[in-house]
Image (cartoon, helix red, strand yellow):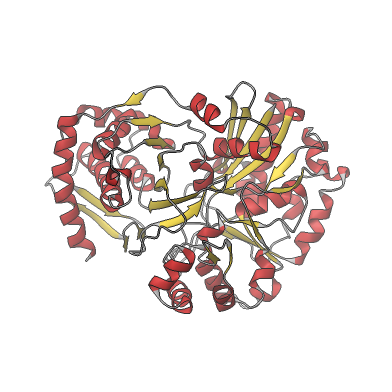
Amino acid sequence: MYTLGIDLSTQSVTLSILNYETKKNELNISVAFNSLEEIKKTSMNKNSLLIYSNVRGKAEQDPNIFLAALNKAFDELKKKCNIKDIKAIQISAQQHGHVYLSEKYKYNLEKLRDKSSANQSLMDMFKDSYSYNAAPIWRTSCTQKEANELREAAGGKEKMIQITASNSPLRFTGAVIKYYFDHNKGLSENTYKIFLLNTFIASILTAKDDVPADFGNASGTSLMDYNKREWNYTLLNTISTDLKQKLGEIDAPSSFAGYISEYFMERYGFDSECIVGIGSGDNPQTKVLYKGDILSLGTSFVYMLDIDENTRDYSGAANNMYDGIDNPFIILCRTNGGIVLDEIMNSYDRTYKEAEKSLEKNTDNLPIMLWQKEYESAPISKAFPIKRYYETPSFDDDYKGIVLSSLGLLEIYLSKFTHKNRDDNKIDLAVTGGASNNKEIVKIIANIWESPIKILPSAGASLGAALSALLLLKKQVSLDDIRESLIDNNIIEPDLMLANKYHNYMKILKERYEDIIK
């Protein structure tokens, strides 16, 4: 009667339980990494959730904390749910992140097939399983040289986009693997497997080391032929001649990985017939929730819309993916999204509620403030410090300014793809992610996109994974009916007078921005 979605994000592990008979999301559990005692045993900073590095653009987390959070989340699930009723599990994980595993990993996996291992934590069992003791994550951007080398190997920018449907972004897994192999002597030779993070979790749950990569998350590696849905050997061999053996095969995100292992049956009470899928990335699983466009308001702001497989953005700003139920879509990711909104809020020591109140009382205020804390992918440009186009800094101006510029620039660079260009001149847009809880931000989105906005469930990627798990059961269940039942009935309508002001504001915003990045 239940499916379970697991999401491994930058900050937490979240579980979502979907009752596919009542079409209800009955339970969500989230375990933040910085709430765990185990974080003290890692080298991760409790605030940034990154391992310290003096290399600009290097972003790593400790994979042991992923496993500690998974144990803790399942501990909570056992208290609140009849786990034997969970029939299928699907996985979501932060895209581009991956782990480097040694031969010891295969030996440790065997322990999960033995019920006597159930009294051990996953962190303790797998702490010596890595050929590199950190997991590079999606914020990694120290890979300019390596990304260029992959692009050149493909035959240049246009050919790279034609093959992979992306222009070898710095953060994509292929460039990162090449960076790590080139900068860590012996790493390639000592690495038995490289798993994308959803594949890693699927491997742990099933105690299998041959779980394929999925073609949704593999789209974010710069190594897969997008239309053929298979690894491109020219690109693989630019990194290592045995890279395919390390990465494994490619299959659909909705594919069967295996049955839950004895460890999870004994420790938590899962049924032996519980099916586990190979899963996909967080963006692909979020897209499962809605057939229209989605704006995900997380650490980065990610816009997703359906396409056909032959669509390409030859400017290189947008990237093609496949969702968790195997459908093609395109994303534009504004890296400096929620991360800069929170930085401004925290610099003034304000709360989320105070930030929402500030926006509410400053509806007509349209300050221009631009800031790229990190290397930006939409459009591709370097980090730069805060630029204010008003005299006196204040929280009201700074917060409204960063909200407007972060969202406004995303819409500006999306305009050639959005559904405004369709004959009916309409966009069918829904929002999800942390900032969608701020109704004033959702109103701003309605005005910038000049469109009614629907609000998706806050669980986002984990709930999308739970929905995609239904495909594993091969039941005659309508995904559309379940989607409809999960969406908030409240729709935020645009204010046409404000929308017109925003239209004029964004012309000036674009001019200011392009003066900075040119």
Rendered image quadrant of residue 158: bottom left
Rendered image quadrant of residue 69: top right
The residue located at (53%, 65%) in the rendering is 225
Vertical position of residue 272 compared to residue 178: above or below: above
Determine whether, in the image, residue 443 is placed left or right of residue 62. Answer: left
The picture places residue 442, in percent across and down from the top left corner, at 32, 33
Say how many tags the image has. Answer: 0
The residue located at (34%, 47%) in the rendering is 340
The picture places residue 200, in percent across and down from the top left corner, at 66, 53
Rendered image quadrant of residue 468: top right
Residue 55 visible? The answer is no
Towards the viewer: 227 or 344: 227
Determine whether, in the image, residue 319 is placed left or right of residue 479. Answer: left
The quarter of the image holding the C terminus is bottom left
Vertical position of residue 148 compared to residue 371: above or below: below
Vertical position of residue 351 compared to residue 39: above or below: above
Determine whether, in the image, residue 66 is placed left or right of residue 487. Answer: right
Towards the viewer: 512 or 373: 512
The quarter of the image holding the N terminus is top right
The picture places residue 359, in percent across and down from the top left corner, at 25, 32
Residue at the extreme left of the image, as rendered: 391
The picture places residue 305, in percent across and down from the top left corner, at 41, 46
The residue located at (52%, 31%) in the rendering is 480
Residue 401 visible? The answer is yes
